[in-house]
Each structure stands twice: as C-alpha cells, then as structure tokens.
Amino acid sequence: MSVGLVLFVGNTFAQQNAFYGGCIFVEEKASQKIKETANELSSWLKKGTRKEFSVVSTVPQAGIFLLKTDSSILPELFAGPVKNKGKEAFIIRSQGSNKLFIAGNSDTAIQYGIYKYLEILGYRWFFPNENWTIVPDLKKITINANLVEFPVFKIRNFFGTGGFGGKLPVDPEMKLSKKWEEWKKRNFLGGEIAISGHAGESFNAANKAVLLEHPEYLAEINGKRQPFAPGTKPCYSNPGLIELYTKDRLKKLKSQIDSDPEGPYSFAVSVEPSDGGGHCECTECLKIGSVSDRVFSLANHVAKEVAKQFPGKYVSLLAYNEHAGVPKIDLEPNVFVVVVPYGFQRTGYSGDELIQQWAKKTKFFGVYDYWSIPDWTNDMPDLNYLVVPEEKIRYWYKNGVAAYLSESTNSSGAVGITWYLSSRLLWNPDVNEKQLLEEFYTKAFGEACAPMKRMLERWANSFMLSDHELGLSFRDILEADELAKDPAVKARIDDYKKYLQYLRLYYEYKSAKPGTEERKKAVRGLLNFMWKIYDSTMVHVYRMHQLLVNRYESADTDLRQEWDFKNNDRWESIKPVSSEELNQMMKDGSEKINPMSLNTGHLIQETLCLSVS
C-alpha cells in the first residue's frame, strides 16, 4: 500500500540541483547489498541522463540518500510512518530542493525504494528481456516526494514448473534464470517471508536408517505398515515418530536461520508431507480425526517446540490434496497455512469457498495457485490477464489472504503481461489495472499500439489455437510491424513474432498424426525453433523441451538421442533466429493461414490507445 503524494518538480529548482549534485550517499557501515543497490541506481540514472553519479560515504550537501530507517542520518520524523509496516516498507522523502531520502526497513526495502523512484522517473521493466526495458530521456531527476509504501501480500512470487534446467549447453552461465530473478526484483515481486514445499521426502531421506529400523513409524494402510520409500507418509500418532520428526524439523529451521537470519526462509520450516496420498489409518491415527486433523496434529507438535526454541518463528504447510479441508482441531498460533484451493482438492467446496472456510480458522494464511503451467497449457496465451489477476487478487485480499505463491511458467508470451500487472496488484490491490494496461500498450508499442492491443486482448478473452486465430494474429503482427518506426518498438514486435511462430509450429505439430513422418518432422522443427528463441524469454523452452521429448514423444527414441543435452553437435548448430528469418516466417504464415472472416471489431480500438504521460 502507499501513503502520500509524489509530483514532478517544476522549474523552480536551480539547474545545478536538477541531478542532486550527481551524488548517491550510503553509509560506510552499509551492507554490501545496499552498496550494490547504490551502484545499480547510479548506472540506471546514467542511462537516462547521460551524466555520471558518484556513490559516496561522506555526507554531501546535495544527493540521494540510501539509508536504513534506523539510521541516525535519517530525520526521525521521516522514519515514523514505516514503523511496524514490515521488512519491505520504504519511504521516499524529499528535503528541500537538493536532498532525496530513500529509506527502508531492510536492505530489500531500500532496493524496492530505488525501483519505485526509477518508476516515478519513467523507467519500466515490462518483461525479463532487454527489449522490454524502458529508459526515459531525463532532463532532471528531482522530485517532490512524501511517499510511504509497503506491500499487502507478504509473499508475491511464482516459479515456472520444471525450472530452467541448470547449466545448459546454450546457457552454461544460467543467464536466463538470472534475467527472471532481476525482473522480479525490479517489479516488486518476492516477499519478506518464504515457504518451502513438500518436506516429507527430505525427512525420509535424512532418517532412512531409523525408519527402516522402526517400521511402526510409517503409515499403516489396510492393516499393513507401508514399506520405506521416499514418499511414504508417517504414522501421525506414534510418539517416537513425532519426536524424530520434531527434532529433524527444528534442525532444519536452525540451518535456515543460521544461513540468513533476516532472510525470507528464516520465517518458517516446512512440515508439509510428501506429495500424494497414503496417509496413516491405524487405530490411533483414526482417533485423531480426518486426514487434515492427522496432518495438522503433527504440524502442531512441531509448532509448539518451534515456539519454545525459536520464538516468533513458524511452521508452514499446505492445505492441499487429502488435507485441503479445514481440520476440526485447533491450530497453534505459529502454524502458517498456504491453501491450494483451485486444484487437487476434494473438499466439496469451490476454491473461493474453501478460502472463506480457512479465513474462519486462521487470520494469517496464504494461497497457492496454478497460473498457466506449461504441463497444462503448453505455453499458450490462455490466461485472461484482463480478468484473472484483479478478480482473484482482490478477492483474496478481501478474505484476509496474506501471501500468494504461484506455480506458473517462465514464458513472457504466455504470462508476461499477467505477471507485470499482478506484481502491482499484489503490492497494492487498489492500483488502477486499466491504467497500467493502457500504459503498457502505449509505452511498449507506441504507434503500433492498436493492432498489438487488439491481438493481445483477443488472446486474453477467447484464445483457441486454430487456423482462424493464427490467421488473425499474423495480420495483426504485420500491421503492427508496418506502423512501427521506433527500432525499440520493432524489437518488441519481433519478440511477439517469435512467440507467434512458436504457436504456429506447435499447432502444426499437434495437427500431425502421432507416429507419422509428418509428426516427427514437426516436433523437430518445433524444438529447433524453440531453442533459437531461448534468450527472448517468450517461451519456457526448457520445460517445453522436457514435455515434448520425455512425455509427448517418449516413444521416439531417436528424438531423445538427437536432443540429448550431451549431444554437442546438436547444440552447436543452434543459432538465434534473425529478423530477416522472422519476417519471412510472418510473410509465409500470412499467405498460407487465413482467418475465417475479418474481425472488424478491432477498428474501434484505434481510439483506445491513448498516450500516457
């Protein structure tokens, strides 16, 4: 949330104060992270002003001051409004014409503060790709500010199913994952707390010898104790298991705190069981109650010891699958629940209703949701960014949800706009999403705004992969390309050309009959093109590769050998797609794929691409 008003200063300031004397101040005792933040601010300001900015530790007469809110240099009056607002709260406050204070309750808060300041100046990072970074032409950087900001959601994050694959032949330095992390940071995603997922598997692995020695510690199903396996559930009523599990989780929490005492993972230790079913149904466990009662009873045992040994810390677990329902037993106050309401639950409640039920049980909980994961959508643009983010996030906020973690995709083409918009709504649900979208269209596409907006909003409202949709999209892209004059705009349209060609090739692959030569040729063409556009972030290439090679076409053993990551010849042949190649692909697509009829409704959108100051 934000408090206060920020305005650009008029011409009343003397010219020499237009750039705060070219100084960015950090205290000598400041952390390395704050010093790196100062250097980053200096770099971005230089790009916008073409002037040098020095990072200094001697208090200047004029400058931008990056400080913790407990710094003696920060006027006491300035720090008051962010007290008790959380670790991510920050202020941006001007003092006279030559000093600007950006102060936060943590190093991360200061980092968010500089990105907010840069956002005020006109910088944008729409997608995690250099083409989508907007750097304004700045004649001055002074602002009149009295701004206090802090996020509503304590977790605002997502991860792409399948990840990035580690050090790949085309990306040995893992630059793509770094791009996404940088982009998240610049768009206020992250959170002051973080949770881990399933812990049952790691508990079993760490305590295998004891569990093998004590089969009674493992779940009983249909009258038989289950054999040890990575995912075998525990016996929730066995005193020995409870003691062993509690010690294991306390040890894990200590390691998390020792690793980063102020970091988000110092918040809680996971007590989430292994994935899947198979919960203990021995006589004593059944006396505890439902599966939810059993799972949360073990969470309570650990939570009590955590409260004794690590006051203020939590245990975390999901309300998921067979334990998605609200337990009848009381919960310890330091049990943090993350509800998975819209998938893998059979409570009889809708997702929204399940959230309401949990809101009656606990006042501090989060939500886990699935937004366009590639395993379900294959990176199609079928998540309606015009409706889903604002409706869901505001509903969650209204019902007391304090955190949101999503499983999604690392595909800018499929969810780039969704996550850019959501990053603002998760910080402040009152933000004007329509204004944000209009700004995105106009700043990203300029004179080509109308056809790009038409295509993207059509995808959002009713995407169906077909000749008709592809035909319309090729027309939209070519119209946008014709209108665009700015090379930066053309580069962004090129990224969507890459994504559109991916959609076409995926369509041709799915249209080919399985087992035929046509299908084999189509999947190889699709894989080759995907890796040629890897750096663009428009497709979650690694995960789609996994799905195509290891799941959809698993019977094609030659394919697996050809596209093995150890096949150096294959990867050395991958070269980025050129603009000329893209243009030929668009021309070919527009000539061969025709829509059923003209979509005349787009004409009215010409007037909707208003300039955003």
Image (cartoon, rainbow, N blue to C red):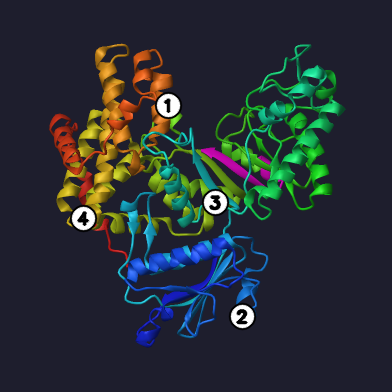
- Name the N-terminal-most of marks 2 and 3: 2
Q: Please tell me in which quadrant of the rendered image residue 177 appears.
A: top left
Question: Circle 3 sits on which residue?
Answer: 190
- Name the N-terminal-most of marks 1 and 2: 2
Residue 67 in view, yes or no: yes
Residue at image point 81% right, 24% down: 285
Check disc 3 and give the amino acid type: Gly
Which element type, helix, strand or loop, lies under badge 2? loop
Question: Circle 4 sits on which residue?
Answer: 487
Residue 386 in view, yes or no: no
User: What is the spatial separation of the Cα atoms under label 2 and label 3, in whole angstroms?
Assistant: 29 Å
Q: Please tell me in which quadrant of the rendered image residue 152 appears.
A: bottom right
Check disc 1 and give the amino acid type: Gln
Check disc 4 and give the amino acid type: Pro
- Name the N-terminal-most of marks 4 and 1: 4
User: What is the spatial separation of the Cα atoms under label 4 and label 3, in whole angstroms?
Assistant: 32 Å
What residue span does the magenta drawing correspond to?
357-370
Question: Circle 2 sits on which residue?
Answer: 75
Question: Circle 1 sits on which residue?
Answer: 546
Q: Is residue 62 left or right of residue 500?
A: right
Residue at image point 44% right, 59% down: 432
- Name the N-terminal-most of marks 2 and 4: 2
